[in-house]
Image (tube, rainbow, N blue to C red):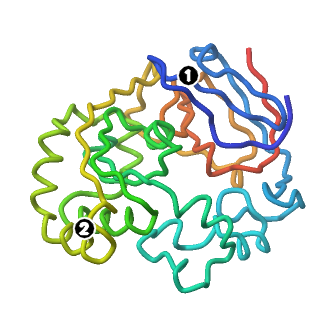
Amino acid sequence: MQGTLNKLTSSLTSPISYQLPVGEQTLELNQLIGKQLSLSFTGQIFCRNCGKKTKKSYSQGHCFVCMRKLASCDMCIMKPETCHFDKGTCREPEWGEQNCMIPHYVYLANTSGIKVGITRHTQIPTRWIDQGATQALPIFKVETRLQSGLVEVALAEFIADKTNWRNMLKGLSSEVDLKAERDQLIAQIKPKLTELAELFSATAITELDEEVVELNYPVDAYPTKISSFNFDKNPDISGILQGIKGQYLIFDTGVINIRKFTSYEVTVSHS
């Protein structure tokens, strides 16, 4: 099997079901756990947007030109509180309307510990799976991406907004009472919520009373020491697939973040 990589796809089963897209083909991964799996980088990278060959991948699979022109590669995607759509400077206003001016959720997740995050309403539960969360709880629904970013910034004063990926891969997070954490955090940011309601509208940010989602991953053995593979340094990766969590394949020889190498052309074999 040969083709360009894309991020792992998944579905919320127990354990989570994973697939590896390779070009136009898809490899079912869960059935390969405990077996030999090899990925070899051919040395070629093709932009996921325009398809042109590029020497280096930018913004997870783009050439330099596309990285500079696409709204999906703008800094405000990483920092939604800096959204500049209302200033008329969005790189692609139509894309912004379709992806940013739509409902978003602010959530709590237990990845390497409790963290806050945001996602479009269409990306639940995919976003949680991609982050390797073992528990997740939506706590606010908002009208736009900008609003979700402002709420996230307020919450980030009290809890983390990033995952320690090494601890996540070691399976070190213990169960957390996310509902209790939610109640405490909402109380802490009440003044900011009032401020945002006055800035936007009373209905822009809605508190939610959802149930905690539990996520289980297909992992036979978690690594105790993390060794990370990089196609740019070593084009050949091989080992016994011991599990999958987040966007990582866990081998007995190391781990690899598949999403990081989107658009890399690889040859995949297994036994």
Helix, strand or loop at label 2? It is: helix
Q: Where's residue 73, x and y in %? A: 64, 67
**Which amino acid, by three-letter code, is at mark 1?**
Ser
- Which residue is rendered at x = 62% and y = 36% of the image? 8
Query: Is disc 1 in contact with disc 2, using a CB cutoff of under 8 Å?
Result: no
Of residue 61 and residue 38, the one placed in the foreground of this image is 61
How far apart are the alpha carbons under marks 1 and 2? 34 Å
Displayed quadrant of residue 134: top left
Q: Which quarter of the image is occupied by the C terminus?
A: top right
The residue indicated by pointer 1 is 17
Does residue 183 appear to the left or right of 59 in the view shown? left
Which quadrant: the N terminus?
A: top right
**Is residue 81 positioned above or below 186 on the image?**
below
Indicate the secondary structure of the residue bearing disc 1: strand
252 or 30: nearer the viewer: 30
Marking on residue 30: none
How many circles with numbers are drawn on the protein?
Answer: 2
Residue 230 or residue 124, whichever sits in front: 124
At which x and y percent is residue 16? Answer: 49, 23
Q: Residue at x 40, y 23 (%)?
A: 216
- 167 or 151: nearer the eye? 151
Find the residue positioned furthest to the front: 202
Tell whether 183 sits left or right of 239. Answer: left
Residue drawn at x 53%, y 66% is 77
Q: Residue 250, how many percent across, how many down?
A: 53, 31
- Residue 47 picture location, percent across and down: 81, 58
Quadrant of the image occupied by residue 143: bottom left
Q: Which residue is mark 2?
A: 154
Name the residue type under label 2. Ala
Label 2: few (<14), some or many (≥20) within 10 Å? some
Q: Is residue 89 above or below residue 106?
A: below
Vertical relation: 114 (above or below) 28: below
